[in-house]
Image: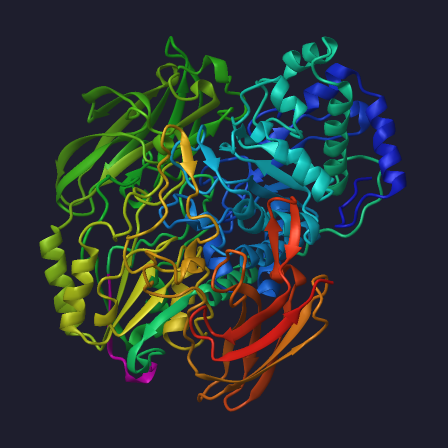
Amino acid sequence: MNRQPTTDAPSAADEAEFARRLGALTLEQKVRLLTGADFWSLHPEPAVGLRRLVVSDGPAGVRGELWDERSPSANVPSPTALAATWDEPLIERLGGLLAHEARAKGVDVLLAPTVNLHRTPYGGRHFECFSEDPLLTARIGVAYVRGVQGGGVAATVKHFVGNDSETQRMTLDARIDERALRELYLTPFEHIVGEGRVWAVMAAYNGVNGHPMTESPLLREVLHEDWGFDGLVMSDWFAVRTTEPSARAALDLVMPGPIGPWGDALVAAVHEGKVDEALVDDKVLRLLRLAARVGALSEVPTTAGPPEHDAVSVAARLRETAAAGFVLARNEDAVLPLDRAALSRVAVLGPNAAVARTLGGGSATVFPPHTVSPLDGIRAALGDDVEVTHGIGVTPQTRTPVAALSHLRHPDGSGEGTEVRFLAADGTLLGSERRAGAAYTWMGSYGPGVPVGLVARVEVHTVVRAADAGRHAIGGSGIGRFRMSVAGTEVFDVRLQLPPGADLVEGLMTPPQCLHTVDLAEGEETEVVLTHDIVSADDAMGDAVTMFQFNLQPPQGSDDEEIERAVALARAADVAVVVVGTTEEVESEGFDRDGLALPGRQDELVRRVAEANPRTVVVVNSGAPVLLPWAEEVAAVLLAWFPGQEFGNALADVLLGVAEPGGRLPTVWPASERGLPATEPVDGVLAYDEGLFIGYRGAGRAGWQPPRYDFGHGLGYTTWEYVSIDVQGAARPDADCTAQVRIRNSGARHGKEVVQVYAGRPGSGVERPVRWLAGFAVVEAAAGEEVVATVTVDARAFRHWDTEAGRWAVEPGTYRLEAGPSSTALPLTADITVGRG
């Protein structure tokens, strides 16, 4: 039998059984287990009853072992959107859904959550992380892990530690002072290891304070010794670059495989006495412990599996979660919610209205079974009685997009799609597949029966059909040699290369392109063949990864023409909904952002539409903050993040008042780019010079720029009166206290409020922020109802890291607790005296 895991520590009997099985293995067998079998799995070992374990990327859904549309996955809201809910039970339920998705795909280990902090909005993976605040990150992360692991799937908290930007991420050394490291960057990991009982940790690419994280003493000194972590530490993919230093560290698993710096080299190092075999044994024991927890080790009793979900319940859960994360940042004259009975015509405008971003690029990529655009969701909600018009307004992308399936036909005329062929160097056909997409990724395998080592080139055969007459840009994106023929005539033969110094993942996410223009009449078809030579990709990952796109841009109007059209539609509508956002060119894994402005002429579009219609609602579809220079010129601003596959339905629910926008900002939304921390290392070193004072914690310091919207900010569809605060509990440094915050729903409808409590230490002799988040609670109340939010303030809120003593300490005296709806709207205050214990 296989065992479904629990969050409890293994019993003494379990540990004895793991040791017995370990004793049955030779050194070579043990070492073999410590490097992945391929990109997404670990080696089985029948001698000890260990089956193959499968891991999967998971920040926005469980992708599984395929990176394409043939293995669809529920696309959940991005982690920043999840943190914006501030709703731990909701996130724990979502974790259960992810566990169900994982088991349905045969996945044992989910490579999520990402709990690096929003140190700066320039961070390329900002959307993949929860918050700038360590407490909010920790509590949402614990809920996420409990939900996933409660369903029998291991969570992997990452990236330990200091992987807060993308520039030179493989090599940079993050210099973080001890207080900031302990109080900010390690705190989410500590809570998730301690309270969440997470089963796996991923070591980051970067170094911290002079040590690459795969060799860092922090793995043993902090994870093992300080926190008592009994789980497994794996590397980020291709992060391990040494044998002995990484093996002597508390790193347990090198990913991916089967090649890597351990293997025979580690066996030799043990024989030569350079690595103690006891270290290898500890790594294998941790792997067996993980296997038992996910049910991959035979003859261990089982418990219940993850909760079951069907497509309807999945859609409902994702729709609810997306709406709960939407942050209503502005709502002048209560333009929202819209009165459906008063609507006859609605203009839905902007580049993200019909084709929205539901997730960020890179390892967060999944392929959902469907996506509901804002345009589709609003049309479905309003029905035939309300006319919904649409215009894109502007095209912010500078790249030609992946070809839409509607423009492609199989060569045999049997329907939409492409045929992909794998050929040997001599032209022998090794295999083929019919595809319903134009983005192609193979990692270590081209599928059953296709020998990886013999594939010399991949051909994409399709027929392009013109929906509209005009000039079509057709081509390919990738790294290596590409050729393309149109109607039997070769139109280009090029070698595409990464720019000097570019991160490899940047090249994979936004690869160089080559295009050819073709004039087609409406309905005209033409045969196209795009060929990619695999052998020319050795400057990337060779046979390990093959990744390229077939691109197509149909005819479209100029920005000037589209803006004028959008303005005319807005002027004729009762309300204009403008959906703007970032593109994969400016926000993705693999590179950091070089600016926070919306790309292209989107700011101009918003201003022109707002001039034409004072009832303009702007929906911001970005994973991280962008500048909103027009914010005071529009009626409403709704921050939607990357909200997953149910975006349009959730948006319609919120716009029409079926659901309340439940989100509160998990990160400061800046008004300008002045004073923000940088992501660019200097001579390989990225200095965290801001120390403790990231985000809202920098308030009141020299150079502080007031933000557009504060941390914790968010409006609902009712109003709240903060009535009183009562602090209870022992005033000892080792004891929690409780703040009872009484609030009244002073509006006309039922609502939700996130009651936030911040701590401060007036007159402190220790350098610290003016205030920091100490606790929060989500409450609901009917119109006119008074409720009490019980906010637990952990004793940790009053501690700081004493760098001289190397331990946590408390400065005795009076601390101030402030309660309210955001970090700068705090109408209630209470003092508490904390002694020496």
- Residue 22 image-quadrant placement: top right
Q: Nearer the viewer, residue 510 or 121?
A: 121
Residue 831 at what x, y percent from top left?
A: 59, 75
717 over 19 or under it: above or below: below
* 207, above or below 582, in the image: above
Residue nearer the viewer, 280 or 804: 804
Q: Percent x, y for residue 91?
A: 58, 60
Q: Quadrant of the N terminus?
A: top right
Q: Residue at x 47, y 80 (%)?
A: 827
Q: Nearer the viewer, residue 368 or 763?
A: 763
Q: Is residue 679 magenta?
A: no
- The picture places residue 200, in percent across and down from the top left corner, at 65, 40
Q: Residue at x 57, y 62 (%)?
A: 313
**Residue 458: % across, % down:** 37, 22
Residue 345 located within the stretch drawn in magenta: yes
* Residue 30 in view: yes
**At 85% from the left edge and 29% from the top edge, which residue is drawn?**
19
Give the magenta range: 339-349
Residue 61 as seen in the image, left or right of residue 508: right
Q: Is residue 106 visible?
A: no
